[in-house]
Image: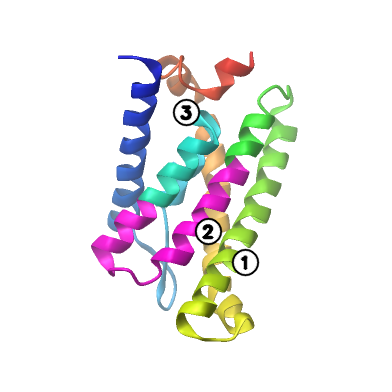
Amino acid sequence: MNTTTKKICITAMGAALFVVLSLCLQVPVFENYYLCLGYIVMGIFCYYFGPISGITVGTLGVCLYCLLISGLRGLPGWAIGNVIIGLMMGLACKCTVNIKSKLFRQIIIMIAVVVSTAIGILGIKSTVECFLYAQPFLLRVAKNMTAFIADMVVLGISFPIALSIEPIMNKTFKELIIHKKGK
């Protein structure tokens, strides 16, 4: 099997794992909001496989999750927001591959997590929902603040997890991960 086919298959499995973690491990945070643990998978895919895989896992995972749980409610804004989050985080991970200091690299990636989640959830998702529900933008931002904080925390946790599984990932997917391409 060639490298492209392997990466497509692994990314599809990542999207499925996004859905499974989002559905099966629901950790309540606020009255009507659960942590989306699928973001851990998205963060790991951004870290190891780059922006395209991260975008695909996040966006396809959200689409499948929404279709299984609530139909189209929440889908457009959340999916488009995940495109931005996956793109920015994936690019941050890919651009910092050659940085020797893991701490400095993690700081840059965490800044990308905060900024991308703010743009994706507070900006994009709120704007789309503003048009869909005919509600004022600031009201949508206030309602999405919970999602922003929770998603930012889960994405932030995903990168230490990615570092802890690095030996396994390097051994299993050595020809596919972006770390090897940078060296």
Q: Are marks 2 and 1 in contact (CB under 8 Å)?
A: yes
**Residue 15 shows in this picture:** yes
**Which residues, given as a range, are shown in magenta?**
61-89
154 sits left or right of 4 in the view: right
Q: Residue at x 70, y 48 (%)?
A: 111
The residue that mark 1 highlights is 123
Image quarter (top left, top right, bottom left or bottom right) of the N terminus:
top left
Mark 2 residue crowding within 10 angstroms, few (<14) / some (14–19) / many (20+): many
Image quarter (top left, top right, bottom left or bottom right) of the C terminus:
top right
Confirm whether the magenta stretch covers residue 78.
yes
Measured as percent of width and height from the top left, residue 152 is found at: 57, 56
**Residue 146 shows in this picture:** no
Residue sitting at the far left: 68
The residue that mark 3 highlights is 165
Measured as percent of width and height from the top left, residue 166 is found at: 50, 25
Please state which of residues 182 and 157 is positioned toward the viewer in this rendering.
182
Q: Residue at x 39, y 22 (%)?
A: 4
Measured as percent of width and height from the top left, residue 167 is found at: 48, 20
| Picture disc at residue 81 | 2
- Tell me which amino acid carries mark 1: Gly
Please state which of residues 27 and 152 is positioned toward the viewer in this rendering.
152
Q: CA distance from mark 2 to mark 1?
A: 8 Å
Q: Earlier in the sequence, mark 1 or mark 3?
A: 1
- Asked where in the image residue 182 lies, by quadrant, the reply is top right
Overall secondary structure of the magenta section: helix
User: Does residue 176 lie above or below 143 as drawn?
Assistant: above
57 sits left or right of 157 in the view: left
- Tell me which amino acid carries mark 2: Gly
Q: Earlier in the sequence, mark 3 or mark 2?
A: 2
Secondary structure under badge 3?
A: loop
Q: CA distance from mark 1 to mark 3?
A: 32 Å
